[in-house]
Amino acid sequence: MEYRLGIEDMEPGSWIAWVFDLPGCYARETSREQAIESAPAAIDELLTRLDRAGFDIKSYPLPIQAAVVEEFQSFPHSPDYLVNAFFEDDTLPLTGDEVEYGRRVLEINRRELLAIIEGLTEEMLERTIPGEVQGNLRGILNHIGTAEWWYWDRLGLIFPRDQRPQETKELLTAIRDFTMTHLPDLIGRDLKTVRSGETWSPRKLLRRAIWHERAHTLQIRRYLDGMSHLASEAIP
């Protein structure tokens, strides 16, 4: 059995190979070919993380082989909104096993994020990061929480925007608690919505929520590594 890949030209110079059999698993590179080539390593990394966390991975095939089954090119809906992929695979209802898998991956991802930011000072959270669209680490953390809220909002299933907590950790906790509580409600649901020209479904919500937090966790790790490097250089 081969792992099925969906290839997305997400934005200029950013290609993603989505692994349909492991929702939220992805390889992101600057070219289509590189994304496809990187997919087996991304699969192996996620399965390793799941195995270490005690999740039964025996049902996932080895050795790892992958093949492209779908492609999507993002397109502008408006000057400030790019429509991202909705694959044929995204139309499939979520199963109970997939939701359990998703909850476990989200738990692992959140644990790793919190471990990375543990002990960060206010100065580090607020320090401006040149070129970062979210401004600083606190901005990225707030973006992780609000984006997950936004995915649920695409399906019309989340609490109102004005009920989102303002404090960063409360925001992350409240929205993740909602996700973990209500993901089982999506099992078997044939639900599809269109917002700003983009199509959404429960399966798309799950893969995007897993991907988004993981991608920004790795981004924060890179920024912190850079800050540590700069700090060590400053020591006489």
Image (cartoon, rainbow, N blue to C red):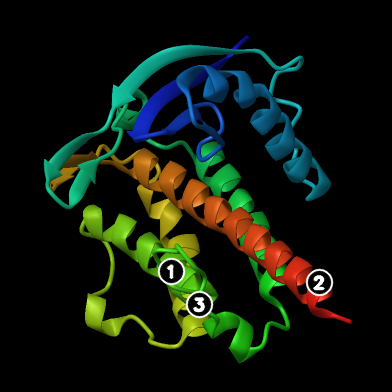
**Looking at the picture, does residue 97 appear above or below residue 53?**
above
Of the two numbered discs 1 and 3 in the rendering, the one whose residue sits closer to the viewer: 3
Q: Is residue 113 left or right of residue 157?
A: right
**Mark 2 Cα-neighbour bin, 10 Å: few <14, some 14–19, many ≥20:** few
Residue 107 visible in the current orientation: no
Instruction: Identify the residue shown where x is 24% and y is 76%.
Output: 161
Label 3 sits on a secondary structure element that is loop
Q: Residue furthest front?
A: 236
Mark with earlier residue (2, 1): 1
- The x, y position of residue 18, in whole percent, is 48, 30
Look at mark 1 in the image and give the residue it sits on: 145
Label 1 close to label 3 by CB (< 8 Å): no
Q: Quadrant of residue 85?
A: top left
Mark with earlier residue (3, 2): 3
Of the two numbered discs 3 and 2 in the rendering, the one whose residue sits closer to the viewer: 2
Of the two numbered discs 2 and 1 in the rendering, the one whose residue sits closer to the viewer: 2
Instruction: Identify the residue shown where x is 35% and y is 35%.
Output: 12
Of the residues shown, which amino acid type is indicated by label 3?
Answer: Thr
Look at mark 3 in the image and give the residue it sits on: 128
Distance from disc 2 to disc 1, alpha carbons, whole Å, reads 33 Å
Instruction: Identify the residue shown where x is 55% and y is 81%.
Output: 127
Q: Residue furthest right?
A: 236
Quarter in which the C terminus is drawn: bottom right
Residue 233's disc number: 2
Residue 54's disc number: none
Mark with earlier residue (1, 3): 3
